[in-house]
Image (tube, helix red, strand yellow):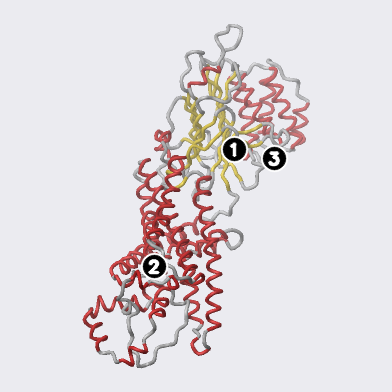
Amino acid sequence: MRLGCAQKTQRAMPPDTENALDVVEMIEGLLSNHSTIKYQELVIVFDKLEDVVNCSMITPNLGQILINIISDILKSDSNLLPFTNTILNITEAVGEKLVGYNGSSTLVTPAVAISVVDVVPGQFGSLTFGVSSACTGTRPEIFINRHPFNSTVAFISLPTVLQHSFPENDWNQSPPRVMFQFYGIPMLFRSQEKGQTLNTFVVSASVTNASSPIKDLDEDVQVTLHHLIPNELFKDAQCVYWNFNKNNGHGGWDDYGCTKHNSSLNYTTCLCDHLTHFGVLLDVSRTQVDLTNEKILTIITYVGCGVSSLFLGITVLTYTAFQKLRRDYPSQILINLSLALLGLNLVFLVNSWLSSWGLYGLCVAVAFTLHYFLLASFTWMGLEAVNMYLALVKVFNAYVPSYILKFCALGWGVPLVICTLVLIVNREAYGGHLYTDAQLSLESMDNSDSFCWLQDDVTFYVSVVAYATLVFLFNTVVFVVVLIQIRHMRVNSPAGIRSGLMHDLKGVASLTLLLGLTWTVGFFTWGPARIVLLYLYSTLNSLQGLFIFLFHCLMKENVRKQWRINLCFGSSDLKSILSGATPHQLESWPSHDQIIREHQYPWSTQSSPAPQTALPLPLTAARETDPAKDQSWAFL
């Protein structure tokens, strides 16, 4: 019974140097066979342990038993949240009062480990502490001044500047010592913050008899911790330390003085300017996608990008090879948008392969290029909306010199300026999860794939999310305005020539893809419908190039005719067709303005269907005049 444990412990004599060993052995025996310890029993046990460490000299034998008791308590199913600070203080006191060793000593249990290293002032160099453990609950191995390796789960490297915190030689004072602690039971440190969970073991470093508090160091303490659960989705990892004063004295995680240096699938490296207990919190505030769905989404994305790259290439080749297709402004904008999307898809497909080379400079270049093509794609979608608004809503006739050249300066120049500014202001924003100069000595710890992209959250949200939000807000407004304009045109057109439902749906789909409105699905991937929306988002956007090919090549009559003329019949067949046309057939062909508008935005106007005797004329055939004079702002 738990009550018997409490009663027997409570009747024990106050411990001193002589009977301390008997007291702790009795407590160890009482706790050894109990899986759960009640709150009142824990209060009594910790009171006795505090008496022992305060009234006794801690020999290695006594210290080992004390650490065994702490380990047994940590491995139990007890609620330890109210006692976290107490356990940390007791463990710290054991290391501070440990005597009877030569130079260094280590106490190891499955849940806790302590190492103390005596320091000679003036002779201190760098000092490292590493812990190797196969899994939670097994007895770890401790390594002093050894580089980390594959099975390392925690690693601390102390800088040489720490020597300024050691007191001068004083025969009346105990020599300074560095103490390391390792806690292999993360449940001891429960985060009070919603959406965050401790995803590493906890390790700490401290200095006894320091001449001044160890804080605001000129050189950072480097802490590398192994993730308990691989960060498959690369959620935000936050470097934190245990603040004893948070949560009304119960303690809690704080990030003051600690920054994330880099983070990969299995490891996070932190830089801190003080000594304390360190850990890494994983941001799980967003609903995680299970591994099965994540793999399926990855396959969809890569297959979609590959298919889109192929058809975007065909689209660009078609519009550049056939001169008559690229005479108007919308076609030229479409070529630039397709080029931007093609670059985005190709860089995305080779990103992981290039990052596997392990070259930091190459990874920065790849991340820069991916960022550039993404912004260029958004920009050209926005310029498509601008041109569409001027053509279908404003409808004013004015010649603008170098119209497409100005669009190209904006479409390709603005993203370049943004990416260059990012590179100048914060070069470290670009890179991968593994490639930083300080991480080179730890490469053997993680052989997982990396992805070269923006690593700084602020840079990402400002230069990508905010930029995309502005573009798509504008595009959405233009989308609504154009639909209203088209609706008015439909209402005012004669009843006999109104289009059918499928024609209207085709126009809306084409407009949605040109303006990139499918990307806005990403803003709604949360809540119960998150998985469904993620599938929709991945499918629509990875296949955007295929849809552009379908709507603007395969389903456009003038493009198909150019294919037939240039690839099947040849130009001589067209000349023979034209030469054989009767005057009545020539009169029945669509007007010049009608041809241009239908060629650019075929879903925006309604024209009378050609009589059955009319000869089908390629839409570009009527435009043999000077394109500069032939271009009207009403039909951009």
Across and down, in percent, residue 63 comes to 61, 22
State left or right for residue 170 relative to residue 613: right
Q: Which residue is mark 3?
A: 79
The answer to whether residue 272 is above or below residue 630 is above
Q: Amino acid at mark 1?
A: Ile
Residue 202 lies in quadrant? top right
Q: Of the numbered discs in the image, which one, if any, rests on residue 329?
A: 2
Q: Of the numbered discs in the image, which one, if any, rests on residue 325?
A: none
Tell me the distance, in whole angstroms, between the alpha carbons under discs 1 and 2: 65 Å
Q: Which residue is mark 1?
A: 185
Tell me the distance, in whole angstroms, between the alpha carbons under discs 1 and 3: 13 Å
Between 95 and 376, which is closer to the camera in this rendering?
Answer: 376
Across and down, in percent, residue 19 comes to 70, 18
Name the quarter where the N terminus is drawn: top right
Across and down, in percent, residue 471 comes to 51, 58
Secondary structure category for the residue under label 1: loop
